[in-house]
Amino acid sequence: MALSRVCWARAALWGSAVTPGPHVTRKLQLVRCGLAWGAPRSSKLHLSPKADVKSLISYVVAKTKVINGKYHRFLGRHFPRFYVMYTIFMKGLQMLWADAKKARRIKTNMWKDNIEFHQLPYREMEHLRQFRRDVTKCLFLGIISIPPFANYLVFLLMYLFPRQLLIQHFWTPKQQIDFLDIYHALRKRSHPEILCYLEKVIPLVSDAGLRGHMTELCTKKALSRAMLLTPYLPSFLLRHRLKTHTIVIHQLDRALAKLGIGQLTPQEVKSACYLRGLNSTHIAEERCRAWLGEWLQISCSLKEAELSLLLHNVVLLSVNYTGTGR
């Protein structure tokens, strides 16, 4: 064994012609392979650089966009009605997610600055109010989706009853107009009853001029849409909701008066009128602004103890508006 090692060493160093044994030949082959391949690579070389990671992410994102575009074109060609529903649903989810992030940011700022809801600017106050109503509506769908396999039934109900179960983010443009008209007709049915109660209290008004003016108000029946909450609640809950809703509207009116009606976009103006009882869907923007200005004059002049008059104002101002035949 010692002699073979010596022979192998001489052959490796000086190129001796001595032929080593098979064991030595195998070792020599391994050494030569090692020299040919070089030194073992460091483990650090196996880690991808940041540039490669970013390139990989960009590639994956680009491929995903291409596949998504092909998928949309396939749905649009072969299933056009389903594609419209799918597009509206995805956009609705995006808008709802954006609303949730904005509401969270507003609540975080309220906590950091130690301010209350009525101290917020108008747009932030209105966003929180609307987002709470949307979440309440979505909460019902979440509850009925809890049982196993109930999500299939939920999708069917959403398709059959979009007005009752879905928020406006998931309505088509045509549905938004049609559903507002339906709500307008539903709310309008309560006006005669409210006006009947007002007529009953006319004799109790001592001032003759006010009594005559109130009679004139109650005899105009060009009804329009009003803001009313669902009546299918216990009386004490309904009173609480009416009181809370009236206070919120009054706080919104004060914030809007501070901001100025001229700062609102056309859509914001129509939404504000819609909330306060006017069916603004078929009314021009200028008339909506004029109506909203009249509303603010009355609302901002009321004190907290007189807020019940604001509920009657919802009916009277919309009833006596002649700018629409609906």
Image (spheres, rainbow, N blue to C red):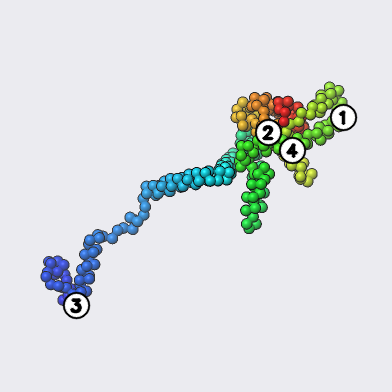
Judging by the rendered image, the residue that carries numbered circle 1 is 204
Decide which of tag 2 and tag 3 comes sooner along the chain: 3
- Residue 18 in percent (x, y) is at 12, 72
Say what amino acid the circle numbered 4 marks.
Answer: Leu
**For residue 118, what is the image quadrant?**
top right
Decide which of tag 4 and tag 2 comes sooner along the chain: 4
Given residues 159 and 105, the one toward you in this image is 159
The alpha-carbon separation of the residues under discs 2 and 3 comes to 103 Å
**For residue 214, what is the image quadrant?**
top right
Judging by the rendered image, the residue that carries numbered circle 2 is 274
Say what amino acid the circle numbered 3 marks.
Answer: Met
Mark 4 secondary-structure assignment:
helix
> Residue at image x 61%, y 37%?
173
Q: In which quarter of the image is the N terminus?
A: bottom left
The alpha-carbon separation of the residues under discs 1 and 3 comes to 129 Å
Mark 3 secondary-structure assignment:
loop
Decide which of tag 1 and tag 4 comes sooner along the chain: 4
Mark 2 secondary-structure assignment:
helix
Which numbered disc covers residue 277?
none
- Residue 236 in percent (x, y) is at 78, 44
Which numbered disc covers residue 1?
3
Decide which of tag 1 and tag 3 comes sooner along the chain: 3
Q: Quadrant of the C terminus?
A: top right
Of discs 1 and 4, which sits in the foreground?
A: 4
The alpha-carbon separation of the residues under discs 1 and 4 comes to 31 Å
Say what amino acid the circle numbered 1 marks.
Answer: Leu
